[in-house]
Image (cartoon, rainbow, N blue to C red):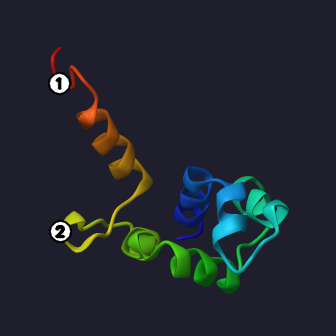
Amino acid sequence: MEERLREVVRHIGPSTLAKKTAIDDRRRWQTVATDIRTKTRVEDLAALLSAYPEYELYIMRGEIDPTRGQISPTYVEADVKLEEPKAGSR
């Protein structure tokens, strides 16, 4: 679960999380994203999920359910690539 939380933080970005969550310290989010020696806190998870509830199922269980709005960073990237011109043309 901790690695998935870090993945989502890297995907969204520390600066964006600092602006959109109750934890307004960009350095804290940067630490969560990159420093595996530092444990993530329940507060980190709660703040992220409060602002981005669509990542809850992925962080907690490693699953997605797009029909219920539950996604992962990989799903978002794949979805964006499918919307690009010439997607799937090779």
For residue 66, side relative to residue 63 (left or right):
left
Residue 17 is labelled as none
Q: Is residue 25 left or right of residue 56?
A: right
Front-lying residue, 2 or 51 = 51
Residue 9 vs residue 68: left or right?
A: right
Q: Earlier in the sequence, mark 2 or mark 1?
A: 2
Counting every numbered tag in the picture gives: 2
Residue at far top of view: 90
Q: Residue at x 24, y 35 (%)?
A: 82
Q: Residue 45 occupies which quadrant of the picture?
A: bottom right
Per the image, label 1 sits on a secondary structure element best described as loop
Quadrant housing residue 69: bottom left
Question: What percent of the width, then of the height, locates residue 3?
Answer: 58, 61
Snapshot quadrant of residue 17: bottom right
Q: Which of 14 and 56 is in front in this view?
A: 14
Give the residue at x 17% y 68%: 67
Q: Position of residue 21 (x, y in %)?
A: 65, 75
> Which residue is drawn at the image coordinates 79% and 60% (left, top)?
31
Residue highlighted by disc 2 = 67
User: What's the residue type where badge 1 is placed?
Assistant: Gly
- Graded by Cα atoms within 10 Å as few (under 14), some (14 to 19) or many (20 or more), the crowding at tag 2 reads few
In the displayed structure image, the side of residue 84 where residue 17 appears, left or right:
right
Distance between the alpha carbons at the discs numbered 2 and 1: 23 Å
Q: What residue type is labelled 2?
A: Thr
Residue that mark 1 sits on: 88
- Does the image show residue 62? yes
